[in-house]
Amino acid sequence: MSTKSNSQSSKNEGKRDFLIVSTYAMAGIGAASVAWPLIDQMNPAADTLALASTEVDLSSLEEGQSITVTWRGKPVFVRHRTPEEIKLAKEVSLDDMRHPETDEERVANEKFIVLVGVCTHLGCVPLGQKSGDVKGQYGGWFCPCHGSHYDHSGRIRKGPAPTNLEVPSYEFLSDNIIKIG
Amino acid sequence: MSKSKFKNPVVKWIDHRLPVFSFMDHELNHYPTPKNLNYFWNFGSLAGFALVTMIVTGIVLSMNYTAHVDYAFDSVERIMRDVNHGWLIRYIHMNGASFFFIVVYIHIFRGLYYGSYKAPRELLWILGVLILLLMMATAFMGYVLPWGQMSFWGATVITNLFSAIPVVGESIVTWLWGGFSVDNSTLNRFFSLHFVLPFVIVGVVILHLVALHRFGSNNPIGIDVKGTQDTIPFSPYYTIKDLFGLSVFLSLFAAAVFFFPNFMGHPDNYIEANPMVTPAHIVPEWYFLPFYAILRAIPDKLGGVLFMFGAIAVLFVLPWLDRSPVRSSQFRPIFKIFFWILLLDCILLGYLGAMPAEGIYVTLSRIATAYYFFHFLVLFPLLPYIEKTKPLPISISEPVLSGGSTASAFAAREKK
């Protein structure tokens, strides 16, 4: 074999490698673009995403009462807090909290606390909406599944939940009507 | 074998073109099996029987089931009350799941005790752990289908485990649900997967059997088969033994189906799912309880999830964690003691998983979890360095027949 044909063959091999790599790359892109619709069909459909926002009238909600409304298939807690509850929620030190947030950051109007009623641990609905419920050591809500205690501001104080109860996006349409979502 | 061993001309004609009969004759009839297998070796075929039972009853149940949040619960009640023999078929399917797990757990502990996962059977073991994982996924999704309170909240809690994954966790959960909570999309896809996964299990079971037949069964003394004097043909010896075991299994199974059909279930699952109210005390099905206890023992969300999956992950690498060359616990005096401690530890974890997550139960869960991982990650690798194993017999025939030189005598007798 002469040196010329050697360099010729290595040149051909280089070409061939390029062809092989680009063929695999194209096949990979092709496979991925076929797979994507099959995977993405499992994400929320347009009608699920289009779920309307929920409006709640708070005028009949007395001090110390709570209501649960549905938003996006999940319970949302609305509580008309008593002055003592507001005081406790505001004055507590944030130092030893797992997810430190002031009460002011979590409410639009300090009388009403609005929370997604889903424990941030594994998704159970915490107790504490009804007057007879166990409310946990901090008087707010208590998740019976794995023992997470939330305070009057829905902040996690004890138990396995990693974060505070989520505050949904909402606005006051008037003094007594809120729109969630 | 040049001449066909089949007399029936049709079988002969087919076998010449498609050797399925030769294959079955070789793998199920002549298949040489160690002659000292005890009754713990029945549980593989029992698991196969349970799988077929689940598939057959499942297919007929699906003919009467409606996968929709508004109808699912009622369609199951209709199966129980109106469909001909529906109550029987559903109770078989429901209890069949529990019995399948009982059989498979015994099968796994058999493997642990007799070292069946060791070379050259590592892949056989790994395929088995894969079957366990698939069974867990299938059972979990099947439990969601009746759309009772436990179905709904079990589904919510288990799918939420994935939200512990940093950054993409929430997106994964939304993707699993197909919405913002467990809802109709979730129920539909769980039904679809619950239907198809059992057939995936069948595929893995076939691979499990191919791997098994490569080196044959392990045996109670854990030493290799040395020759034909150590084996007997699978049929009729083990077919009859398996059939006897099956009749015992079926007696117990029938007792559960006819007399205690709801013993292993939870009464809250006869209440229709309500997304607004979580039952005061939610528990998974009993076969998940040890893993659930591990999840709750760790006071951190991601940590709990990692440890729970880790409890199964350690099983995958077990063939390389155990460094002892001796397979059977019969010759490992210290390992044998720890085996029973592990078994008790798993039962304790199962009990703790059913108890509320508070007080002494949390402390005990932590101790039991620590022991589980200690056993796999510390004991398995280190014990061989301290343990003095008992001398292994020369062959399987030796301890079976009394006297030292009988093995060769037996071999000679076989030849005649």
Image (cartoon, coloured by chain):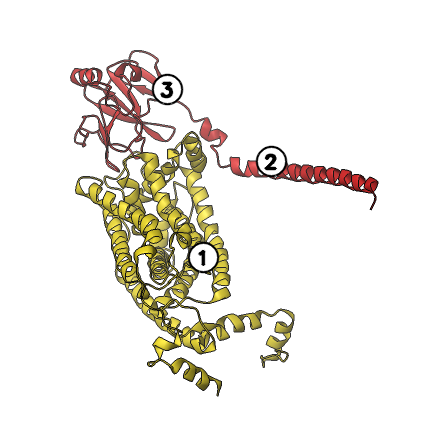
Q: Residues within 10 Å of mark 2 (few under 14, many from 20)?
A: few
Chain B is shown in which shade? yellow
Marks 2 & 3 on one chain: yes
Q: Amino acid at mark 2?
A: Ser
Select label 2 or label 3 by which is in front.
2
* Residue that label 2 marks: A33
Q: Are marks 2 and 3 in contact (CB under 8 Å)?
A: no
Nearest the eye: B52 or B107: B107
Residue A154 in the image, given as x and y percentages of width and height: 26, 24
Nearest the eye: A125 or B63: A125
Residue A30's disc is none
* Residue that label 3 marks: A169
Q: From where the camera sits, is residue B28 visible?
A: yes
Marks 1 & 3 on one chain: no
Residue A31 in the image, given as x and y percentages of width and height: 61, 39
Q: Are marks 1 and 3 in contact (CB under 8 Å)?
A: no
What chain is colored red?
A
Mark 1 to mark 2 CA distance (whole Å): 37 Å
Position of A8 compared to B246: left or right?
right
* Residue that label 1 marks: B122
Q: Amino acid at mark 1?
A: Glu
Q: From where the camera sits, is residue B142 visible?
A: no
Q: How many marks can you see?
A: 3
At horizontal 39% and vertical 40% (from top left) the residue drawn is B69
Closer to the N terminus: mark 2 or mark 3?
2
Which chain does tag 2 point to?
A
Element class at badge 2: helix
